[in-house]
Amino acid sequence: MTPAAVLRHLAFAVGLALLSAAVVRAMIAARVLDRPDPRKVHTRDTPKGGGVGVVVAFLVGIAVLYRFAEFARLADPYFIGVIEASVAIAIVAFLDDLNDWKFTVKLAAQILAAVVAVVSGIYVVDYRVPYVGPLYIGWLAPPVTVLWLLFATNAMNFIDGLDGLAGGVALIAACFLAGIAAAHGGWFAYFAALLLVAGLAGFLPFNFPRARIFMGDVGSQFCGFTLAILAVVASRFDNVELSFLIVPMLLSGVLFDVAFTLVRRTLAGERLTEPHRGHLYQVAHRSGLPAVTVSLLHWGFAGFGGLCALLFLAVPTAAKPFIPLLTLVLQLCWLGYVARRARRAGFARWG
């Protein structure tokens, strides 16, 4: 890619960021309010739905990509599938922000969006694994992809509980992914990640360090779903074994928190659909760690995941399986730190 092309893309991204910011300001004025309750951090009515700005910027950018950027298009069935699934998840999540639907209703809508993406052909049948070679999973590919899309979408949704946390993590992950995709000729992943960066850059100043508006489900679910889709796209990068691990490394802090919390609550016999305050980031905040600090730590986890992804791409094939373990080690250290704080704070139970 030429320097002139990079400048054009950055100028386009700046324009989309300004569009996102304008939509976010409109959503603040619309006063769709998130009311305080015992499991939430905020103590006053705060507008939500700021993620609409992210969605609008992304979809406008995708429309331009479809019309003019032939170099970065997927085949039409895949491309249209991405658009349809993204629009579906955004609409349903926004309606949830307005109506506060039950989790089962939200999950059904997420399954529908994931199925739309998979039916369009966005799934991976074979994975290139060092020491093993191509690993074909055949008919398991579509359901495995659906499960991944659901987990990543809800992980980002669950982590969106402190000012700037989810938005900052998604922004950093998308920045790294855009750079990695460009370096490996994954032009659709590059352009789509750049669009997500633009939308989040327009939103985040309104959400951090003190939120004037929350992202809402429309933002957190959309970001999680989009990054999950791009993880599937990244798994097809040419000549990169285990490339399906790039996005999980970028989102390692989010994915570990949610996976650990699900396992902990299951073993404790708690209902998984019941609201709680037992995520690691919530326990850390409840133990006295400032919200800004917790959010910045998670930004750091995303940055560390990005550096690990770059290292992962640089090392010989034989060493690749060990690089993702670095993100796991960091998360285990974080778990130990939060557990110590919880004990000192006298938490009998984390939820």
Image (cartoon, helix red, strand yellow):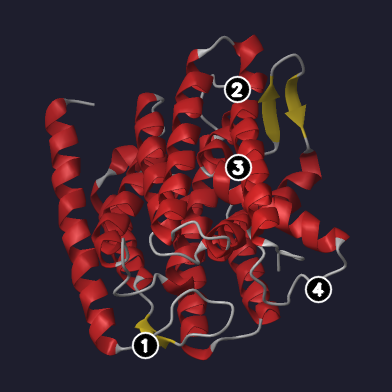
On the image, the x and y values in percent for residue 193 come to 37, 46
Instruction: Kindly check if marks 2 and 4 are in contact, taking CB atoms under 8 A apart as contact.
Output: no
- The residue lying at 57 percent from left, 9 percent from top is 316
213 lies above or below 180: below
**Separation of disc 2 and disc 4 at Cα?**
35 Å
Residue for badge 4: 271
On the image, the x and y values in percent for residue 290 come to 44, 59
Near mark 3 (Cα within 10 A), the count class, few <14, some 14-19 or many ≥20, is some
Task: Judge by depth and name the residue closer to the eye, 323 or 237.
Answer: 323
Q: Classify residue 203 by image quadrant.
A: bottom left
Secondary element at tag 1 = loop
Secondary element at tag 2 = loop
Badge 2 or badge 3: first in the primary sequence? 2
**Amino acid tagged 1:** Val
Q: Classify residue 246 by image quadrant.
A: top right
Q: Which mark is residue 334?
A: 3
Badge 3 or badge 4: first in the primary sequence? 4
**Nearer the camera: disc 2 or disc 3:** 3
Secondary element at tag 4 = loop
**Separation of disc 1 and disc 4 at Cα?**
29 Å
Near mark 4 (Cα within 10 A), the count class, few <14, some 14-19 or many ≥20, is few
**Nearer the camera: disc 3 or disc 4:** 3
Q: Which mark is residue 7?
A: none
Which image quarter holds the N terminus? top left
**Amino acid tagged 3:** Trp
**Separation of disc 1 and disc 2 at Cα?**
43 Å
Residue for badge 2: 323
44 lies above or below 23: below
On the image, the x and y values in percent for residue 71 come to 31, 37
Residue for badge 1: 32
Secondary element at tag 3 = helix
**Nearer the camera: disc 3 or disc 1:** 3
